Amino acid sequence: MQELVAELLKGNRRAAARMISLVENDDPQKRELLKDVYPHTGNAYVLGVTGAPGSGKSSLVDWLLKQIRKDDLTVGVIAVDPTSPFSGGAILGDRIRMQDHALDSNIFIRSMGTRGSLGGLSRATREAIQVLDAFGKDLIIIETVGVGQSEVDIVKTADSTLVVLTPAGGDSVQTIKAGIMEIADIFVVNKSDLPGADKTATEINTMLDMKNDQAWRPPVVPTVSVSNEGIYELWSAVQEHRRHMEDSGRLLEIRRERVRRELTEQVEYLVKNRIWDRVKEKIELESLVEKIVKRQKDPYSSAGDLLSKIKFYDQDSEEGD
Ligand SMILES: Nc1nc2c(ncn2[C@@H]2O[C@H](COP(=O)(O)OP(=O)(O)OP(=O)(O)O)[C@@H](O)[C@H]2O)c(=O)[nH]1
Ligand SMILES: [Mg+2]
């Protein structure tokens, strides 16, 4: 395991892939690994790309990669699909499109599916970002399909977030979920070759103009990601947002907030595990369940009794704090 971290830091792609699999599978050894990885993180900038299925996220990322590589940055891409059980290799469509980049040693592409647990996906994504950060990537792009709360959670890990919309129908802006609106640092109106694109852009702009309390006013960038239109402008907008985040101190602020959340989660994780280990050791949980089912006991007082039985309550006073 120690060797795996050493190999990762040396830039070994297979070590990176292996380690992402470990975090994805929630391997018991991953905490040790992540602990050793952590001191080597904090250098990568994280760009989130989210939007409805088929809005053109992968095609955009594909073009962005070509643009970004001109700046000589190394890039990691994690394509997260909460609706797919597949992971590991890229999803077929993405693989075909992104195969040019696969040969570029400065680009690392990986897809992640749910593997049965939606809740675990945003955690696994955060951990995969740490791995790619330590691996030495300057920029990490997370592509995630917009299907609800899961992508909002995932995108919260990003330093800048692109929300990809398309000129669909004309009622597009009305149907944007409030949560998505809040997370957008840059709006992309992709498929601007299709009718209604101008109208969509105007609607978003009108809506953005109505709330003028923001330190950063998200730009609206039209793109056509089957050709190369708007990609240079999009990349410029990302860089401008990054400068804003750095210069305003906002980047430090959101990273501090993220660390606070992470620490809270880790404490809760440890406490929960410790409690359940002791409960399983000392208590016949099934017979308690049976009694509750038969209405001989209730879950409310049983929870408290359970904690007293494992001396969760008493221990504090015994130790004198
Ligand atoms: N007309 C037009 N079609 C586009 C454009 N960008 C993407 N498409 C097409 O839209 C389809 C979906 O593109 P993807 O890049 O796979 O979209 P995605 O958002 O990554 O899709 P999922 O990952 O499945 O959610 C493909 O058939 C693309 O060729 C565009 O700018 N104009
Ligand atoms: Mg895609």
Image (spheres, rainbow, N blue to C red):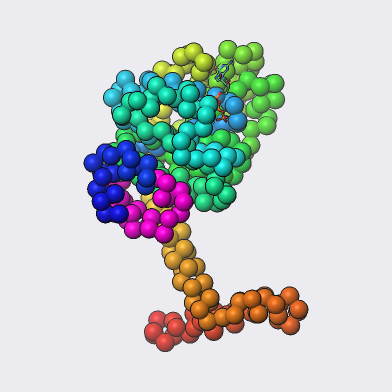
Quadrant of res 203 = top right
Answer yes or no: is residue 137 visible. yes
Q: Residue 55, how many percent across, how many down?
A: 58, 25
Dominant secondary structure of the residues highlighted in magenta in the image: helix
Residues 301 and 136: in front is: 136
Q: Can you say which quadrant of the picture contains the N terminus?
A: bottom left
Q: Residue 222, how many percent across, how many down?
A: 52, 18
Residue 126 belongs to magenta span: no
Vertical arrangement, residue 281 with respect to residue 256, above or below: below
Q: Over which residues does the magenta segment extend?
A: 20-41
Q: Exactly how many numbered labels are in the figure?
A: 0
Left/right of residue 51 with respect to residue 76 in the rendered view: right
Q: Residue 228, how many percent across, how many down?
A: 46, 14
Q: In the image as oriented, which residue stretches furthest toward the right?
A: 294
Residues 178 and 118: in front is: 118
Answer yes or no: is residue 187 visible. no
Q: Residue 292, how many percent across, how many down?
A: 71, 77
Q: Residue at x 59, y 80 (%)?
A: 284
Q: Residue at x 46, y 39 (%)?
A: 88
Q: Residue at x 64, y 76 (%)?
A: 286
